[in-house]
Image (spheres, grey):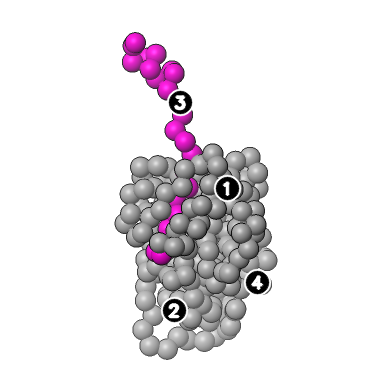
């Protein structure tokens, strides 16, 4: 059989889901749920950010699922890279509560969708199925990952970090203390005015660094 015939007759690769999960019991439970709610997809578990990066390169997942309870230091930086390499993928974050005011304003068009722990199995299944196949067309992909997604990710992770945002010649910072958005600044602008401006910047580059000492508090979102 010619190489051309083999190529024509080869089955397309099975679509995949990559789950970032630290705990074995949760990895097994979520993987089992994915067999029920996404039977056409293969589910693979990453135990670290480096393993996630490798699996993403090998599989080109249709969906990423990140369990951020407990949090992963450096996840923002990795997502900034994955946005470039997998712009058509979608992502679901499992974690703590996110600011309802900001989440409502963003709607379902963001790059990251969220489900809060603890959750009902049916709610998890609905969230997964909404991000797969034709039903996902109204949902954002990692292509549109922006500052608001990174900010909500840190809130769901319940961490204290400083997000660094760069867009063209502009730079800004958003401070999150124990999952609460408390400060933002860009240039001489601070507080809610700075946050509102930063969140409009197109195609920002995103990174995070640990917060040392007490956070500045110019406003409060929870």
Find disc 2 in the rendering and name its residue. 160
Marks 2/4 in contact by CB < 8 Å: the verdict is no
Are the residues at dot 1 and dot 2 in contact (C-beta closer than 8 Å)? no
Q: Which mark is residue 11?
A: 3
93 in magenta = no
Q: Secondary structure at mark 1?
A: helix
Q: Earlier in the sequence, mark 4 or mark 1?
A: 1
Hey, which quadrant is residue 194 in on the image?
bottom right
Q: Is residue 165 visible?
A: yes
Which marked residue is nearer to the observer: mark 1 or mark 2?
1
Q: Which stretch appears magenta?
A: 1-23
Name the spot of residue 135 as percent of width and height, x first: 65, 44
Sort mark 1 into few (<14), some (14-19) or many (20+) by Cα contacts within 10 Å: few
| Front: mark 3 or 4 | 3
Say whether disc 3 or disc 4 marks the residue closer to the N-terminus. 3
Quarter holding the C terminus is bottom right
């Amino acid at each position: 059989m010619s190489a051309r015939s083999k190529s024509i007759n080869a089955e397309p690769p099975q679509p995949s889901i990559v789950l970032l999960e630290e705990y074995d019991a949760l990895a097994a439970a979520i993987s089992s749920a994915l067999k029920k709610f996404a039977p056409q997809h293969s589910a693979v578990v990453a135990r670290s950010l480096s393993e996630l990066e490798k699996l993403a390169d090998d599989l080109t997942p249709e969906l990423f699922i990140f369990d951020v309870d407990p949090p992963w230091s450096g996840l923002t930086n990795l997502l900034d890279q994955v946005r470039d390499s997998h712009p058509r993928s979608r992502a679901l974050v499992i974690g703590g509560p996110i600011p309802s005011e900001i989440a409502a304003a963003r709607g379902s068009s963001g790059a990251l969708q969220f489900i809060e722990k603890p959750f009902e199995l049916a709610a998890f299944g609905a969230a997964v199925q909404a991000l797969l196949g034709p039903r996902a067309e109204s949902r954002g992909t990692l292509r549109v990952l922006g500052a608001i997604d990174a900010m909500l990710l840190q809130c769901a992770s319940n961490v204290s970090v400083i997000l660094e945002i760069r867009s063209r010649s502009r730079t800004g910072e958003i401070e999150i203390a124990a999952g609460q958005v408390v400060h933002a600044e860009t240039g001489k602008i601070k507080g809610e005015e700075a946050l509102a401006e930063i969140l409009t910047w197109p195609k920002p580059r995103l990174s995070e660094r640990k917060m040392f000492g007490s956070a500045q508090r110019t406003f409060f979102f929870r």
